């Protein structure tokens, strides 16, 4: 299987991200880096999500023009374990996420809907392969079929609540999870892939 790693950035690649990609134990992959200068939308959170979604969609178009069977979307500040691609390929799923934490938080960038409009992030890595409602698009393995049917949205037009009752934006990852679910795709977290987030 041919795999294309897709990394978006506004300027540079973190050295540990670079090293982790070059040290993968799976050989049949290529790496595409899409650099795009960010626009200013006023609010920092809105700007971050809109710029990432726009950059990722442009990279998506270029990625689909390749002959890859699978795509690994990897943010420029995330370092993979060396067996990441191999482990992803062991599972015949259209969408899988690798585990990575939110910056300065004990929460992980994945989770499930706990109740009506209440979203709960996982607080620890779970082993094996688990079904979730959201994976982090900063480390997401996706089939050609799924990527051809799904796009990236900023998710700054929708809000939800955490288990503590606090309001939060759905964000890019949550918007992608909702879109995938609406189109009939299941999302999974792969417990064999634990990444480092250097943001």
Image (cartoon, rainbow, N blue to C red):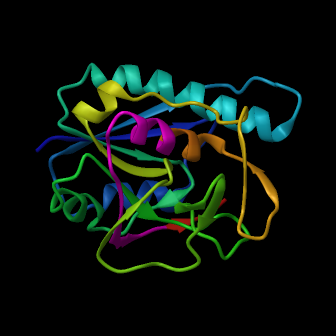
Q: Nearer the viewer, residue 176 or 27?
A: 176
Asked if the magenta segment contains residue 184, the reply would be yes
Q: Nearer the viewer, residue 196 or 42?
A: 42
Place of residue 125 in the rendered image (x, y in percent of width and height, measured from the top left): 46, 78
Which residue does the image show at 22% across and 65% down from the upper left?
A: 87
Which residue does the image show at 41% across and 42% down from the upper left?
A: 181
* Quadrant containing the N terminus in the rendered view: top left
Depicted 152 relative to depicted 104: above or below: above
- Number of numbered discs: 0
Q: Residue furthest front?
A: 116
Residue 198 in view in this figure: no
Place of residue 168 in the rendered image (x, y in percent of width and height, measured from the top left): 77, 52
Q: Nearer the viewer, residue 17 or 144?
A: 144
Q: Residue furthest left?
A: 1
Hey, which quadrant is residue 2 in on the image?
top left
Q: Does residue 97 appear left or right of residue 71 in this picture?
A: right
Depicted 139 relative to depicted 47: above or below: below
Depicted 53 relative to depicted 171: above or below: above
Place of residue 60 in the rendered image (x, y in percent of width and height, measured from the top left): 40, 27
Asked if the magenta segment contains residue 97, the reply would be no
* Quadrant containing the C terminus in the rendered view: bottom right
Instruction: Write the start and end of the magenta stretch as one range.
Output: 177-195
Which residue does the image show at 49% across and 25% down from the upper left?
A: 57
Q: Does residue 151 appear left or right of residue 148 in this picture?
A: right
Which residue does the image show at 44% across and 26% down from the upper left?
A: 59
Q: Does residue 15 appear left or right of residue 188 in this picture?
A: right
Q: Residue furthest right?
A: 42
Place of residue 179 in the rendered image (x, y in percent of width and height, measured from the top left): 47, 35
Hey, which quadrant is residue 53 in on the image?
top right
Residue 30 in view in this figure: yes
């Amino acid at each position: 299987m041919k795999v294309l790693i897709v990394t978006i950035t506004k300027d540079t690649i973190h050295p540990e991200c670079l090293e982790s990609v070059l040290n993968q134990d799976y050989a049949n992959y290529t790496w595409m880096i899409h650099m795009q200068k960010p626009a200013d939308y006023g609010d920092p959170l809105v700007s971050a999500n809109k710029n990432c979604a726009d950059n990722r969609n442009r990279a998506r178009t270029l990625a689909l023009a390749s002959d890859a069977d699978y795509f690994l979307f990897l943010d420029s500040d995330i370092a993979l374990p060396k067996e990441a691609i191999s482990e992803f390929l062991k599972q015949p799923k259209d969408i899988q996420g690798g585990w990575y934490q939110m910056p300065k938080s004990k929460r992980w960038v994945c989770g499930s809907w706990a109740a009506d409009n209440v979203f709960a992030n996982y607080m620890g890595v779970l082993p094996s392969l688990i079904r979730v409602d959201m994976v982090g698009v900063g480390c997401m393995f996706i089939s050609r079929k799924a990527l051809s049917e799904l796009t990236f949205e900023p998710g700054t037009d929708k809000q939800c609540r955490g288990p503590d009752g606090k309001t939060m934006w759905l964000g890019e990852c949550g918007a992608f999870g909702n879109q995938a679910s609406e189109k009939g795709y299941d999302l999974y977290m792969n417990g064999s892939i634990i990444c480092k987030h250097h943001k």
